[in-house]
């Protein structure tokens, strides 16, 4: 449900519980009025306190962390800032799939609200070349296995880009900025988690190729020349797609290369 007023409201856990349509993902929630970073909080939990599918959510994230040591800015009570804990016990090569999966879950959710989302490898969620959401996955590895993944998601919902630091104002957007509607964040979050749970089944059933296909259908640079940052060097190539492990396939100087990490400019 949406209304057209422009207000901030604290996140309602009872409303969230009522709307939640999952069986595992998001069933356990740890809500905090304010936190420095939901990812850092999740990382500080003991093994016994880490439950598969649990989410940590705050209404005011004071020092949100982005990829490559950047800061994630989020005004209080406007957007969604949360971390989802997954205990997957899968091979380390598949760890990149969680960014892909989360991007598709957000895309499938936002498309239902009429938002024309595009995904940028590895994990930026864009609308009209502006960022609407960011994903920060942090994994704990033991031997060849991924023991836990903390998936941090920041989604701009009722944010006004004019309230952002000046250098971000032209590169971010939000649902409200695009449609002019004020959204109930509990609706959006429960919808993302629903899509996440469905997509996660593809990974547990070894149907990653379906996930890859879905991701490619939202991708904004397939078949295009891209420039990316890798280990302080700028490289150009043709983006050909992603592997069933979520790595990028790029043609560089006529040769196909697999990239596990990097940043497309
Ligand atoms: C990026 O695009 O650089 C990733 C941004 C990830 C931000 C989210 S907000 C919730 C979670 N907690 C954090 O400190 N960061 C992530």
Image: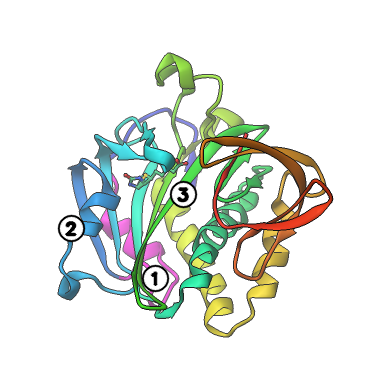
Q: Quadrant of the C terminus?
A: top right
Sequence order check: which comes first, mark 1 or mark 3? 1
**Disc 2 CB within 8 Å of nearest ligand 1 atom:** no
**Disc 3 CB within 8 Å of nearest ligand 1 atom:** yes
- In x, y percent, where is residue 120? 63, 45
Quarter-wise, where is residue 55 in the image? bottom left
Residue at the (26%, 44%) spot, across then down? 37
Q: Secondary structure at mark 3?
A: strand
Residues marked 1 and 2 touching at CB (< 8 Å):
no
Sequence order check: which comes first, mark 3 or mark 2? 2
Residue 25 badge: 1
Regarding ligand 1, which quadrant of the image does it lie in?
top left
Say if 47 sits above or below 230 in the image.
below
Residues marked 1 and 3 touching at CB (< 8 Å):
no
- In x, y percent, where is residue 142? 33, 75
Sequence order check: which comes first, mark 1 or mark 2? 1
**Residue count near mark 3 (Cα–Cα under 10 Å), binned few <14, some 14–19, many ≥20:** many
Q: Is residue 22 magenta?
A: yes
C-alpha gap between disc 1 and disc 2: 20 Å
Q: Secondary structure at mark 2?
A: helix
C-alpha gap between disc 3 and disc 2: 19 Å
Q: Which residue is mark 2?
A: 44
Query: Nearer the observer, disc 1 or disc 3?
Result: 3
- In x, y percent, where is residue 236? 72, 38
Say if 172 sits above or below 124 in the image.
above
**Which region of the structure is painted magenta?**
11-27
User: Which sits in the foreground, 194 or 104?
Assistant: 104
The number of numbered badges drawn on the structure is 3
User: Which sits in the foreground, 138 or 255?
Assistant: 255
Residues marked 3 and 2 touching at CB (< 8 Å):
no
Q: Which residue is mark 3?
A: 135
Quarter-wise, where is residue 184 in the image? top left
């Amino acid at each position: 449900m949406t209304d057209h007023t422009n207000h901030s409201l604290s996140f309602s856990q009872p409303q969230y519980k009522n709307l939640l349509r999952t069986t595992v993902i998001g069933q356990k929630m740890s809500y905090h009025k304010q936190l420095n970073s939901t990812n850092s909080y999740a990382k500080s939990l003991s093994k016994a306190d880490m439950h598969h599918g649990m989410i940590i959510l705050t209404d005011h994230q004071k020092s949100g962390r982005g990829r490559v040591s950047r800061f994630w800015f989020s005004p209080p009570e406007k957007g969604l800032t949360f971390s989802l804990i997954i205990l997957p016990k899968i091979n380390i090569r598949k760890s990149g799939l969680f960014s892909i999966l989360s991007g598709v879950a957000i895309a499938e959710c936002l498309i239902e609200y009429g938002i024309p989302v595009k995904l940028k490898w590895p994990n930026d969620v864009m609308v009209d070349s502006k960022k609407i959401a960011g994903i920060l996955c942090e994994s704990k590895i033991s031997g060849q296995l991924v023991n836990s993944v903390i998936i941090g998601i920041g989604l701009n919902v009722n944010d006004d880009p004019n309230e952002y630091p000046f250098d971000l104002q032209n590169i971010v957007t939000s649902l409200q900025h695009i449609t002019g509607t004020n959204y109930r964040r509990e609706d959006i979050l429960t919808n993302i988690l629903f899509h996440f749970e469905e997509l996660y089944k593809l990974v547990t059933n070894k149907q990653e190729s379906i996930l890859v296909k879905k991701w490619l259908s939202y991708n904004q640079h397939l078949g295009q020349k891209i420039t990316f940052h890798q280990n302080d060097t700028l490289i150009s190539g043709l983006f050909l797609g992603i592997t069933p492990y979520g790595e990028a396939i790029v043609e560089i100087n006529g040769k196909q290369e697999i990239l596990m990490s990097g940043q497309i400019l």
